[in-house]
């Protein structure tokens, strides 16, 4: 099992429905958090963190809506699309890593500046490459041609950047890396999936890239949208991962915005219950 348990779990339909309901409730809370923190004047790292939190919430809603038996989309017949579930699951993991990297981890001011500068350099580099590839007029590329050297210089002057090995500095200066830590390194620092991260990430990544490991597992039962024991097990695991990330993201936002969020009635319940709670909003719609 990818998740260790004192008792052997049965990944049956009942467990699936319980995990689905669990995720449903967490999304309801996450949407409430997102609504409360909108428009607050905060330092740049927390502006970006809030944007990434919103992305986590939005992706989680889409994730929920493609799951069989969700309460918003009637599927006749039910459609068990494991590869799409895996793709969104991995995206949510990676978005949380970016959220943690820029807005959650306790780091020095120099390190904050380094990470922000690195992300800006990557963003502008990617925009420049994209615009150039689609043939945008040279006059419109001028801002990037003038600005990218300045972004690069900001990185070079950063104390944290200067501590990195020269070979790695050269890699970062290519503008192809948004974070200087790998997903595995960030996962260890964020303490979400611990030893389960590598096998889960590998499982999801194979589905994302349609490798032989993923595509050649198709059979009369698997990979055709039908419910089956193997893919139901994988989907339950992915729901558990997304739920864990969503809870972690909510509690991280509470630490970033304690004055705004600690007063919300469900926050104390989440802290006390430690992810073990009953549905409180049955029949309600998520409101944006």
Image: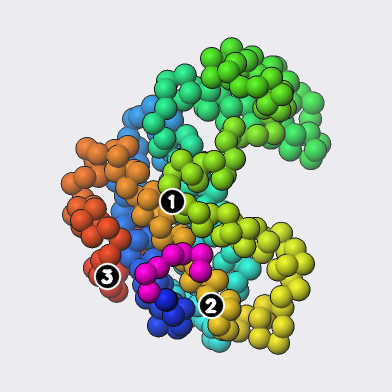
* Placement of the C terminus among the 4 image quadrants: bottom left
Residues packed near mark 3 inside 10 Å, few (<14), some (14 to 19) or many (20 plus)? few
Residue 74, horizontal then vertical, whole percent: 48, 80
Residue 193, horizontal then vertical, whole percent: 47, 54
Depth check, mark 1 against mark 2: the one in front is 1
Quick check: is 276 in the magenta stretch?
Answer: no
**Residue 140 visible from this viewpoint:** no
Quick check: is 2 in the magenta stretch?
Answer: yes
Q: Which residue is mark 3?
A: 279
C-alpha span from label 2 to label 3: 23 Å
Mark 1 and mark 2 residues within 8 Å of each other at the beta carbon: no
Helix, strand or loop under label 2: helix
Q: Residue at x 59, y 32 (%)?
A: 180
Q: Which residue is mark 1?
A: 192
Farthest top residue in view: 157
Q: Residue at x 48, y 23 (%)?
A: 111
């Amino acid at each position: 099992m990818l998740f260790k348990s004192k008792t052997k779990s049965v990944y049956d339909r009942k467990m699936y429905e319980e995990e689905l309901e669990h995720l449903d409730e967490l999304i309801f809370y996450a949407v409430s958090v997102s609504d409360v923190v909108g428009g607050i004047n905060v330092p740049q790292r927390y502006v970006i963190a809030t944007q990434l939190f919103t992305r986590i919430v939005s992706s989680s809603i889409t994730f929920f809506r493609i799951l069989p038996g969700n309460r918003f989309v009637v599927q006749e017949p039910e459609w068990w699309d494991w590869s799409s579930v895996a793709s969104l699951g991995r995206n949510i993991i990676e978005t949380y890593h970016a959220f943690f990297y820029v807005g959650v981890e306790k780091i020095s001011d120099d390190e904050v500046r380094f990470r922000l500068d690195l992300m800006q350099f990557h963003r502008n580099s990617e925009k420049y490459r994209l615009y150039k590839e689609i043939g945008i007029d040279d006059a419109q590329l001028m801002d990037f041609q003038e600005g990218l050297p300045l972004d690069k210089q900001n990185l070079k002057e950063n104390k944290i950047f200067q501590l990195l090995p020269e070979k790695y500095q050269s890699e970062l200066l290519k503008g192809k890396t948004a974070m200087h830590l790998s997903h595995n390194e960030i996962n260890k620092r964020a303490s979400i999936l611990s030893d389960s991260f590598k096998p889960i990430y590998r499982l999801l990544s194979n589905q994302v890239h349609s490798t032989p490991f993923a595509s050649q597992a198709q059979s009369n039962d698997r990979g055709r949208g039908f419910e089956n024991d193997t893919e139901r097990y994988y989907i339950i695991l992915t729901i558990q991962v997304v739920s864990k990330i969503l809870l972690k993201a909510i509690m991280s936002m509470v630490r970033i915005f304690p004055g705004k969020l600690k007063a919300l009635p469900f926050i104390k319940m989440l802290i006390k219950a430690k992810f073990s709670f009953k549905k409180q909003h049955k029949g309600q719609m998520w409101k944006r």
